[in-house]
Image (tube, grey):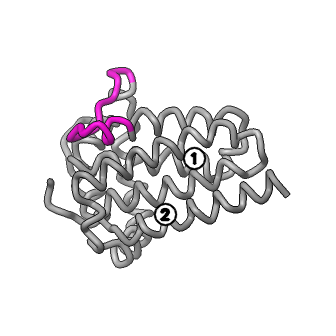
Amino acid sequence: MARRMALTGLLDQLDEVECGSRIRLQDIVDNFASRGFGPLLVLPALIALLPTGMIPGIPTLCGLFIVFVASQLALGKPSPWLPRRLRERGFSHERFHQAVDRLRPWTQRFDRLLKPRLQALTEPLPRRLVAALAALLALSMIPLELLPFAAAIPALAIALLGLGLAAEDGLLIVIALAVMALGAFVIWRWLLP
C-alpha cells in the first residue's frame, strides 16, 4: 500500500503534477494510488448528501456510480478503473490551484482529525468488506430517493466510509457503521410507525 500522506499533501502533490492545462479524473486516481477508491466514494456521496441530492435522479446516479467503484474494491482491484470517457473528464489546472489555496485551511484541519487509527479495519480483507457494505448502501439510495431526505442517510455513511478508507482511519469507519445503524433504525421507524 502507498505510504500515507495527509490530505493537504496529496492535494499539493496533485497540484504540482505536470499534466498540462487540465487535470483529468485519472490524474486524481493515480495521485491517490491505492487510496483512490476513497475519494471516488466520497465525491458522489457528498453530491447525494448536499441539497443537490434533492434533484430527482441524482441519488440514483450517485448510487450507481458508487456501486461501480465500490464493487471494484470489493473484488480486490488494487486501484479504480474508469471508462476512458470518464477518465478523460477534467477541469482547469488553474481553477484547481485556486481551489487548493482556498481549501488548504480546511484540509489542514481535517489532517489533524483524520489519522491512522484502528488500522485493522483498513487491512485488505476489511477494506473489501467495507466496499461491499458501501455498494449495498448505495443500492439502498435508489428506492430511498422516493422519501424526502432519506437517501442522505446512506450517503452520509458512504462519505464517512470513503474518508475512512482514504485516510486509513478505522475510527471513521466505525462511526460510519454507527451512522448506518442509526439511519436504518430511523428509516424503519419512519416507514413502520
The quarter of the rendered structure image containing the C terminus is: bottom right
What residue is shown at x 58% (from left), y 52% (from top)? Answer: 154
Q: Residue 103: percent from the left, percent from the top?
A: 43, 63
What residue is shown at x 49% (from left), y 63% (from top)? Answer: 177
Q: Residue 171: percent from the left, percent from the top?
A: 38, 72
Mark 2: which amino acid?
Answer: Ala
Q: Nearer the viewer, mark 1 or mark 2?
A: 2
Q: Which residues are magenta?
A: 71-85
Q: Give the number of callouts.
A: 2
Q: In the picture shown, does residue 143 fall above or below 173?
A: above
**Tag 1 residue:** 47
Mark 1: which amino acid?
Answer: Ile
The quarter of the rendered structure image containing the N terminus is: bottom left
**Tag 2 residue:** 176
Please tell me which residue lies in front, 171 or 89: 171
Q: Residues within 10 Å of mark 2 (few under 14, many from 20)?
A: many
Helix, strand or loop at label 1? It is helix
Q: Is residue 32 magenta?
A: no
